[in-house]
Image (spheres, rainbow, N blue to C red):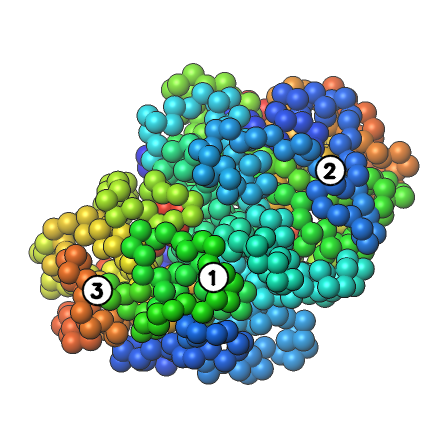
Amino acid sequence: MPELPRVVVTGLGVVSPLGPLPAFWERLCAGATGIVPIDAFDPGPGAPRRGACVRDWEPKEHIPAAELRRMDRFSRLVVTACRTALADAALALDAPGAEATGLVFGTAFGNLSESEEFLRGLFAKGPARANPLTFPNLVLNAPTGYAAIDLGLRGPSFAITHGEASGEAALAAAYDTIVCGQTQVVLAGGGDELPHILFQVYKDLGVLSPHGTTRGGRRRVGRRAGAVPAEEGREWSSPFARARNGFVMGEGVAMLVLESGVHAHTRGARVYAELVGHASESVPSSPHDWPHPDGAPPVATARQLAALGWVPRAETSHDEGREARADLAISCANSTPHLDAYESSRLTRLLGDASARVLVTSLKGAIGDFGGAGALAAAAAVLALHNGRVPPLAALDEPDPDCTLRLATPGTASPAGGFAHALVSASPRGGGCLTLLFRRP
Amino acid sequence: MGADLTTPVVVTGLGTVNALARSAVEFAHELRRGSCAIGPLTVFDPTGYRSRIAAEVMPVPEASCLPSPLRRRASRADVFAILAAEQALADSGLEVAASPHRIGVALGGTTGGMLRAEECLHARIEGRLACYRPGPLLATPISTSADLMASAFGLRGPRITVSTACSSSANALGMALDWIRLGRADAVVAGGTESLCRTIFAGFNALHALSREPCRPFDRRRSGLTLGEGAAILVLESAESAARRGARVHAELCGYGASADAHHLTAPHPEGAGAVLAMRRALARAGLEPEAIDYINAHGTGTPLNDAIEIAAIKRVFGAAARHLAVSSTKAAVGHTLGAAGAIEALATVLALRDGFLPPTVRLEEPDADCDLDCVPVHSRPATLRYALSNSYGFGGNNTTLVLGRA
């Protein structure tokens, strides 16, 4: 049986609360945060009132005016990321190339703002006045539809939705699309917006910082909408911190150009990293909550990673490389008591003997949390492999004493030899866990 | 467990809840009879809509296999999915507990728990806070049904939800096929689910896409689609795994092809460029020539544009062989179930292959000159079928074709 093709990352496009590339990466490594007071809408009385909102983005600079008119904001974010990723990959697509190129995008909620607007109109004015121009923008695959039109892409095109792991799930699906031989090139990634309605719902549920302190992840169901809570703590996002108190909502989109190794080699492309593969495992969990920290260990994930060549050894063996390199794990920990405890437990058990040489970080302190955030984590993993730097947990003052992982604090030096592997770990509500494995080429 | 991209993948379990039937056995029976399940819209107040008909699942059966806290929170779409999966798993005889990590979930859907979310949003907007619960708004993510399914049946393999509008569940079946071939799973509980909701109804209404009369695909008088709801779940399994445990094989899933139109968000490409690519890619991946295909379960929505372009695309792919094809649309019987349509139609195709009949286009009485293939009008016919395609095209220009074969 012929060997499966290798899949490499040759381009990155980011629109984020830290700006586009290269600012996104520079600010991330410098420990900057994108969390600011929300001004896109009125966050209502009391905390929370902060979010990680996209900055330094002017859609006009990326998308022709004629296309912009019809496109909703979410699709504009995605099309911008697609265009910048293709440019970064220096991939000029001729007609047959575009016809074969795939597009896979992951989002938890899609264009929720316009869904709400559409429904408000429907409730207020009745069906006869519902807006036919808005409606097509509400489907989760509208952004891929617009991107396909903009770039002329006719390859396999999928919108994936997998809760907080939607970005990782899209990259996994894109990887499969290439190794199955469906196509040689896929633009893949994910993202979500920070819509008012979702902010309001999370606020009502009491899961946002500073009110998301309940360790069991229990919801404050029944909290009156708009009611001002009595106590006001510090509103921040600090994954793995002892004093973490809920997540901060963010938004952003990242797209990666994935190519078969042969395709990238033939065109002489710069290769950032190799996407070695992915591991998926469903952990028993309520569909509405994160898995329990004391739940089943990630044995199937460990087995799948081993099959991809990543085994948790304390040191890299001599025949594996010239120098012992560290590994990096980018966790989905988002400053929620329950999720971070689960991630800490999951990674501790997954890394095993390798714990000492694997640096663990999370981007959520800088970009907040949103459904497609994993695509930005993947972009960061790729850049960390490419240039050997580690984006730190910038806000981490005092780590959770229960967490024994080797956390990348602001003072942590990047390893001299760079990183050999980078894992991106996703544990969404509902327990459909995913792990992406990248390797330095 | 290794990857083998040529490994045969078969269908060993079937389940459905739709307007026409509450099980696959009933569905086969009703398709043969040429029944139509389209009736008055009652799921929500139909006042003000141009069209007031739909293919509803009424009453909604209880998902008694769910523990009560989960059952209370389950949306209409969740319930359809759970019931169809329960049937499909029972039909397959799979022992989930024996290898839970080797069984995945792949679902398609477009609106998930939107119906109840709409009510909550309405309550919040109008300040009726006693009726407002934020929970259902958060249960809107379409991935909830897959999460619930994994939880209810203890499925611990890979999990994914695809949302490419009306081709969602065809893509979910395709990805499940790839998983099995890549060795990610031995079996996948795959399909789609969809519940009627105001958002979709109002949207299609505003686009003038809904027919006032029950839809008539390929008919000269066709004037739009009729929305429906329901779920279909297929248990896909590697042929090796099925043979090892002596499972009954309903059909084979031979391949799939996906494409984007790159043309317009709602209108199909005028030459059906994406539809042609999807069919060609599917045939290529299945290693089949067009001549091998006996039947196509068409996307066939009943809109003037879709049907004419789809038939033209079929002719482009099949050339002279198109004259020997039967092409029908089961949407005239069960409505257009959007995210579930690909799975419900794949199920209809499996039943056609297995039981040897052509499902009819039930209300096709005056064939359109533009749709001049054998569209199996009104009545089903017995037929020996070897291979069949199932086409699904979605908003956003997403096209998918599945290739199915007789066991």
| Residue situated in front as seen by the camera: A210 or B254 | A210
Residue at the image point whose x is 77% and y is 54% from the top: B205
> Quick check: can you spot residue A108?
yes
| Residue situated in front as seen by the camera: B114 or B324 | B114
Circle 1: residue type: Asp
Q: Position of residue A425 (x, y in %)?
A: 31, 55
Callout count: 3
Residue at the image point whose x is 80% and y is 31% from the top: B362
Nearest to the eye among marks 1 and 3: give it: 1
Nearest to the eye among marks 3 and 2: give it: 3
Q: Earlier in the sequence, mark 1 or mark 3?
A: 1
Residue that mark 3 sits on? A242
Residue that mark 1 sits on? A204
Q: Residues within 10 Å of mark 1 (few under 14, many from 20)?
A: many
Residue that mark 2 sits on? B55
> Quick check: can you spot residue B263?
no
Residue at the image point whose x is 35% and y is 32% from the top: B100
How far is mark 3 from mark 2, CA to CA?
A: 53 Å
**Residue at disc 2, secondary structure:** loop
